[in-house]
Structure formats: structure tokens, C-alpha cells
Amino acid sequence: MTQHRVRVALGERAYDILVGGGLLDRAGEHIAPLLRRSFAVIVTDENVAARHLEPLKRALAQQGIGSEAIILPPGEAQKSYAGFEHLCEALLALKVERRDHLIALGGGVIGDLVGFAASVLRRGMDFIQVPTSLLAQVDSSVGGKTAINSRQGKNLIGAFHQPRLVLADVDLLRTLPPRELRAGYAEVVKYGLLGDAEFYAWLEANGTKLLSGDAALLAEAVARCCAHKARIVAADEREEGERALLNLGHTFGHALEAETGYSQRLLHGEGVAVGMALAFRLSGTLGLCDADLAPRVERHLAETGLPARLADVDGAQAFSAERLLDHMRQDKKVRDGKLVFILAEAIGRAVQRDDVPVEAVQGLLSEQLDRRAA
Ligand code: GLY
């Protein structure tokens, strides 16, 4: 299978994202040139460790790289003050040095947590991302956003800290639970919707086959998403402008995640899927884009097994428009008290807007919630 190399052009902090099959088994070859001593600490979770830790340790050992592993319980709860403290203390107990590299082996939770620890430990260490979920491969492992959660909301305590290398091995995606793979696919769809109409059409044609585990299609999709994200991050690392477009679907999505308690009732990507469909509905209502685009988006999400409407979310009968709006008011994009939405002028043309009347959002939510009762 073709191996793709995507460069994130950030001057002296530039790095490569390698995408393809068999990368875990050759991880040592790619990591060795970065290290200053032949040692690294791998941080992972119990589920990922069971499948992928030994192969990674073996691949490092083949290049003479010694490693220690810290294995955390799985789940979002690790992205807490307590989880962060536990990880930092465990790393310091291993006497990690400032010039060592941490390796984040896992999904978005591990990547965000390890990246944040790396950003502050000994005032800043290097780290490498080995993402094992589709969501992490196409989004969270790239671009240097790291964070833990606060009681006030998700990802509110964090830093921009770029990895030194990302190894996205698509073979690792084959063992993912189908629901998790689909949830990650929502972030793939996001790239088409926000900035690449041709890619979106390609996904409409290939999405179902890709989700059945076709490695070549997965690699092509991951590489295209990473190339797209790399370009945006290089132009706007700290989200002063264009990078905010990557939050398409996230204002609604985060509100839904908060309302469902960040639980298995709604995975992050599923929230993003509903959120993207709502963003297209809202864009249609406001006359920003053709009203027939929202049904097209909903159709593709539904045919790939993703939720597309509020009614598709577990427990939707208990939602209220006011509570969802309250969650949105905690969004990181709120500016001068105004909600900021990523909306669409077309498929492949997203725009940031801070002038959306709250009544329009309320109307859309109420309409979908009323329909739920019908
Ligand atoms: N996940 C959105 C970003 O990295 O900017």
C-alpha cells in the first residue's frame, strides 16, 4: 500500500505525518532519528495496550530504543485534573528528562492528555503521536491542540504544543469497534463539507466501502484529511481565523455531548455528525446556502450509520432547546458574549459567523425537538 507523507510546515517546529499500513511495526525506524537518547516513554490505555503496546515496544527495541510504558484506564475521565496529576507523577517517577520523547499511543483522550503533559512537564518536552482511532488520525493527533477538561466544559485547560511526528497506521483501524470507526468518519466528512466539495463527492461514492475496512480507501481518506488540516494549521496555528472552520458541527455537537454527559450515549463524532447536519439546516434557514443541501448531508450521514437529527440521539425526548443553548454559551468560540457558528455557503465552503440570531437557533432546535414528539 502507498505510504503518504504530509508535512506540517511550521518552521523549526515542522513535522511529518506518515499515513499508511504497517507503520507500527516500523515505528522504531521513524522515531529513532528524532531521539536524543535511546529511550522513550509510551503512554497508552488498557484497551490499546492489549493490542498494540507489545508491537510498538518490539519495533522500538529493533532500533535499540529502550522504553517504559504507562498504561491508563480507558475513557474521557482521564482528561481530568486527577488524571493529569496521576500521569505527570508517573512520568516524573520514571525520571523522564526534558530532552526525552513521550509517545502517545491511543485515541483522542490519550493524545490530548499526553500532549498537555508534554507541554508543561519539565517546562516542555517533545512528544510523538501514534493515533489508533480514525478520529485521532484525521483530527486530534494533528495540529498541536492538547487539553484536559474542566467542570465547566471540555478541553478548557490546555495548550498548543505540536508533536514531533505523527504515525497514522491505518491497519490499526481494522480492529476498532464499528461504532467508533463510524464516529471517526464524521470528522472525515467534516473536511469535505468545510473545504473540499470534490472530496465530499468522493466520500459519497466510497464512504460505505471505506467503513467496511478497505485499507487503501482508509489510507487515502486519512492522508487527504491530514493534508487539509496540515495546510490550515500551517496558516493559522492558534486559531485566529481559518482554523476555526475545523469546528464545523462542534458548537451543536459539544452541546449535545454535554447534555448526554459525555457518555456512550453519544460519541464525540456522533455529536459532530448531528451538529454538521444542524449547521447545514441553519445555513439553509438563514439563506446562506441552498435549502436542499441539508437533506443531502443528512442522507450521507444516515447511509453510513451516523445520527443526523436530534431525534437520533439517545434520550432526545428529554432535551430542551434552552438547555442546549445554555451549553453553547460555554463554547470556546463565544466572543463578547455572542455565539459563533461555523455555517456553510455551499458544500466545501464553510464560513464563521458571529451574527446568527439566537432565535434562529432556538427555532431550529425547537422544530427538531417538536418533530421528535410527533
Ligand atoms: N480539532 C480542531 C482543531 O484541531 O483545530
Image: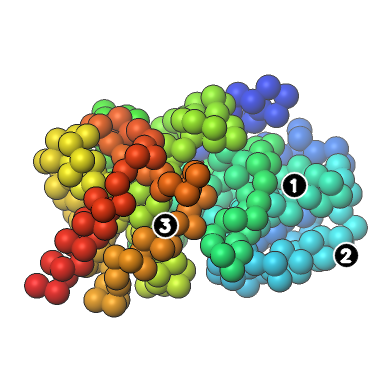
The reply, left or right, for residue 354 in relation to residue 321 is: right
The local crowd at label 2, few if under 14, some if 14 to 19, many if 20 or more residues have their Cα within 10 Å, is: few
Amino acid at circle 1: Ser
Residue type indicated by callout 2: Ala
- The answer to whether residue 319 is above or below residue 209 is below
Along the viewing direction, whichever of 60 and 139 lies nearer the viewer: 139
Residue 319 location (% of width, % of height)? 30, 72
Contact? badges 3 and 2 (CB < 8 Å): no
Mark toward the start of the polypeptide (3 vs 2): 2
Residue that carries the numbered disc 1 in the rendered image? 119
* Scheme by which the image is coloured: rainbow
Q: Secondary structure at mark 1?
A: helix
- The CA span between labels 2 and 1 is 18 Å
On screen, 210 above or below 363? above
Q: Nearer the viewer, mark 2 or mark 1?
A: 1
What's the CA distance linking mark 3 and mark 2?
Answer: 40 Å
Q: Which residue is mark 3?
A: 328
User: Considering only vertical position in the picture, is 256 above or below 341?
Assistant: below
Q: Is residue 49 left or right of residue 348?
A: right
Q: What is the x, y in percent for residue 111?
A: 61, 53
> Is label 3 in contact with label 1 (beta carbons under 8 Å)?
no
> Hey, what amino acid is under mark 3?
Met
Quadrant (top left, top right, bottom left, bottom right) of the N terminus: top left
Ligand 1 near label 3 (Cβ, under 8 Å)? Answer: no
Identity of the residue drawn at 60% across and 62% down? 149
| Residue at the image position 68 percent from the left and 41 percent from the top | 161
Instruction: Assign the C terminus to one quadrant of the image.
Output: bottom left
Q: Residues within 10 Å of mark 1 (few under 14, many from 20)?
A: many
Eyeballing the image, is 327 above or below 161? Answer: below
Label placed on residue 93: 2
